[in-house]
Amino acid sequence: MNTCGARLHSEERKTAFVALLPSMAIFCLFTVYPVIYSLYLSFFDCSLLGGQKTFIGFGNYARMMASSDFRVALANTAKYAIGTVPIGATLSMFVAVLLNMKLRGRGLYRVAYFMPVVTSMVAVAIVWMWVFDPYYGLFNALLEKVGISGPAWLADPRWSLPSVIMLGIWKNLGYNMVIFLAGLQDVPAEYYESAEIDGAGAWQKFLYVTMPLMRTTIGFVLVMSTIKSFQVFGQVYVMTGGGPMNSTMVLVYYIYRQAFEFYKSGYASAVAWFLFALILVLTMLQKRLLKAED
């Protein structure tokens, strides 16, 4: 009986392996192999167009650290993350709390807030280019009504990165809102009822009931938002092309330019691996901080 069962179990495993083999092969071919090959390329001086590859060890990494353009891209990426993550998470939580209440038409509001998430970044960026237009844009038209002359948002180095940050916050608000909503709906109603009996108001309930019970959800949103913010690319590519004066040059766009405009695939691979290591360290650091708070 045991021998028969073991044979059947072995047959099931073989069938499962055969069924998974095509998808595993595709995953290895289009994901694992390119990742490993990019690490290999990062130690060579080579061009995307082919030609001779010259082994230079950590030369690309040393060149990256010495590059002023790279430092600008790193600083802009950090500014983008600092600008989007805390404000975006706070706004998402605020909207989630509002839409968790018994409001008329809240299903419609939830759909409206989630719509930007499923909309193409290119389409969204084109619409926001009109919103930021200094002559015909919505923002400057509204500012004119209160007597303020609006800036040339995307053409002014002082305002270009804040403009990209605003779009990033708006685009990701719905995604984080859905995660917060799921977390809020897991908070037992008994805790709120007990807090009300003790005389707690809405703010006290949020501070002493909602926030502690939402700590894991908040941590997840912060980690995911940080990872996303360091991978910003679409809006920069469409709206500013890294300009003006490199004011919106971020790391992923910098990698894109090095690889596909200057054809420096070895150098671009080195920057990509630096970005991967940076995100990994930040994620582990955030997880450790959140665990320490628990």
Image: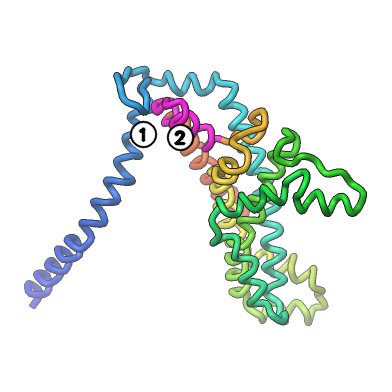
Kindly indicate the quadrant of the structure image that contains residue 202: bottom right
What kind of secondary structure does the magenta stretch mostly adopt? Answer: helix
- Magenta part of the protein: which range? 251-269
Mark 2 or 1, nearer chain start: 1
Residue 16 quadrant? bottom left
Name of the residue lying farthest toward the right: 147
Query: Is residue 292 visible to the viewer in this orientation of the structure?
Result: no
Across and down, in percent, residue 250 comes to 58, 36
Residue at position x 58%, y 43% from top? 238
The residue lying at 47 percent from left, 37 percent from top is: 277
**Label 2 with label 1: CB-CB less than 8 Å:** yes
Question: Which circle marks residue 38 in the picture?
Answer: 1
Q: Position of residue 164 (x, y in %)?
A: 66, 44
Using the image, tell me which numbered label, if any, was put on residue 272: 2
Q: Quadrant of the C terminus?
A: bottom right
In the picture, measured across the screen, residue 149 lies left or right of residue 253, that is right
Relative to 56, residue 250 above or below: below
Q: What amino acid is at disc 2?
A: Ala
Residue depicted at x 75% and y 65%: 207
Which amino acid type is marked by label 1?
Ser
189 in magenta: no
Please name whichever residue, 27 or 190, is drawn nearer the observer in this view of the structure: 27
Instruction: Locate residue 293 relative to residue 270 in the image: left or right.
Output: right
Residue 263 belongs to the span the image colors magenta = yes
Query: Taking 240 as reference, is 51 above or below it?
Result: above
Whole-number angstrom distance, CA of label 2 to CA of label 1: 8 Å
Which colour assignment does the render follow?
Answer: rainbow
